[in-house]
Image (tube, rainbow, N blue to C red):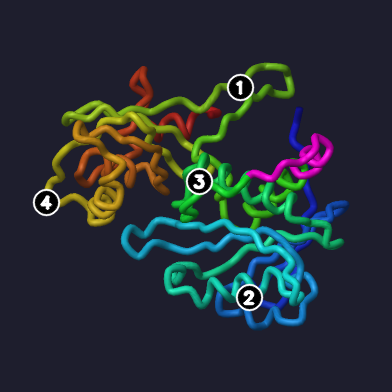
């Protein structure tokens, strides 16, 4: 079934794209806010932020440069404080100085109780961990809220919308690097060719990759060259260093790694300056450049 278009309402609360953002969908009770850490105080007095909800803290690791995320819940307190108070607590916490912005999920009708936010926190945390895009900073798996089957169906619909809005806000925390895509069919009913796997098999390597709409993904299980030459680009050296825990003693990648360009990916694999458009080849020997220029993939 062909995916339907969606209409998302995005409101720039401060009139600039780097400020606070509010998102809603038609016929959805969910309300989503993207708030820079520096703008939390500007949210005082807003009713939505005195409610319960689930939130994400996003930032970058100083050690590795990788994206990190913490997922939490905020219940309504007896003093009337809710989401904003919890975020302010995190801002004061020296152990959570890595985050630069928060994304908050709540509802327009204040319908989240303890069971609902526990269910959503657990599902969001597991989804983010499985996608493996971000380092999830939660030290323990959130408790799973026990809900009726009717409520579970309702919350899963909420999650489907949350995934869409989160991606629109720039965080693909729920999206695996490699999506499972159903084979497409042309208007004439012909099955269109799927994106091929490309390989590099020289200088001790046995690497494979796929093209995606974000760039090129070198696949887990690829064998990369052990050593790097002196002229290896600095970015390739840095990516190797940052992923040393994802490369085993046999130089085998333990996870998929996304690169923006074919040459970035091939330089990482070969430990040398390379032209990825000719290094990456299909199993029958076609170079990536020719495949992109001459075929539907």
Circle 3 residues within 10 Å: few <14, some 14–19, many ≥20: few
Percent across and percent down for residue 31 are: 77, 61
Q: Are marks 4 and 1 in contact (CB under 8 Å)?
A: no
Give the residue number, with chain letter if any, for mark 2. 19
Nearer the observer: mark 2 or 4; the answer is 2
Circle 1 residues within 10 Å: few <14, some 14–19, many ≥20: few
Percent across and percent down for residue 105 are: 70, 59
Q: CA distance from mark 2 to mark 4?
A: 43 Å
Q: Which mark is residue 192?
A: 1
Q: Earlier in the sequence, mark 4 or mark 3?
A: 3
Give the secondary structure at mark 2. Answer: loop
Point 51% across, 70% down: residue: 100
Give the secondary structure at mark 3. Answer: loop
Q: Which mark is residue 214?
A: 3
**For residue 118, above or below residue 184:** below
Q: CA distance from mark 3 to mark 2?
A: 25 Å
| Quarter occupied by residue 148 | top right
Point 69% across, 45% down: residue: 145
Point 51% across, 77% down: residue: 92
Q: Earlier in the sequence, mark 1 or mark 3?
A: 1
Nearer the observer: mark 1 or 3; the answer is 3
* Residue 264 relative to residue 100: left or right: left
Nearer the observer: mark 1 or 2; the answer is 2
Give the residue number, with chain letter if any, for mark 4. 230
| Quarter occupied by residue 57 | bottom right
Q: CA distance from mark 1 to mark 2?
A: 42 Å
Give the secondary structure at mark 1. Answer: loop
Q: Earlier in the sequence, mark 4 or mark 1?
A: 1
Compare residues 48 and 148 and report the one nearer the observer.
Answer: 148
């Amino acid at each position: 079934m062909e995916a339907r278009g969606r209409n998302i309402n995005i409101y720039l609360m401060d009139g600039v794209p780097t400020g606070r953002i509010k998102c809603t969908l038609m016929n959805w009770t969910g309300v989503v806010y993207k708030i820079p850490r520096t703008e939390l105080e500007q949210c005082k007095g807003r009713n939505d932020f005195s409610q319960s909800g689930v939130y994400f803290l996003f930032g970058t690791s100083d050690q590795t440069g990788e994206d990190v995320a913490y997922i939490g819940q905020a219940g309504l307190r007896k003093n009337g404080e809710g989401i904003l108070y919890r975020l302010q607590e995190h801002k004061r916490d020296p152990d959570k100085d890595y985050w630069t912005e928060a994304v908050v999920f709540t509802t327009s009708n204040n319908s989240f109780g303890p069971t609902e936010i526990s269910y959503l926190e657990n599902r969001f945390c597991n989804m983010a961990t499985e996608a493996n895009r971000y380092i999830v900073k939660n030290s323990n798996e959130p408790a799973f809220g026990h809900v009726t089957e009717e409520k579970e169906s309702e919350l899963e619909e909420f999650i489907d919308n949350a995934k869409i809005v989160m991606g629109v806000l720039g965080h693909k925390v729920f999206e695996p690097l490699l999506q499972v895509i159903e084979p497409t069919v042309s208007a004439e009913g012909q099955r269109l060719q799927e994106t091929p796997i490309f390989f590099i098999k020289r200088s001790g390597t046995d690497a494979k990759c796929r093209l995606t709409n974000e760039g090129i993904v070198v696949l887990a299980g690829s064998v990369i060259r052990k050593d790097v030459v002196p002229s290896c680009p600095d970015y390739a050296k840095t990516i190797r260093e940052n992923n040393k825990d994802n490369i085993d003693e046999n130089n085998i990648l333990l996870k998929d790694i996304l690169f923006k360009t074919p040459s970035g990916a091939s330089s990482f694999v070969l430990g040398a300056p390379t032209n990825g458009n000719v290094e990456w080849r299909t199993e029958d020997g076609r170079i990536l450049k020719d495949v992109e220029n001459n075929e539907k993939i």
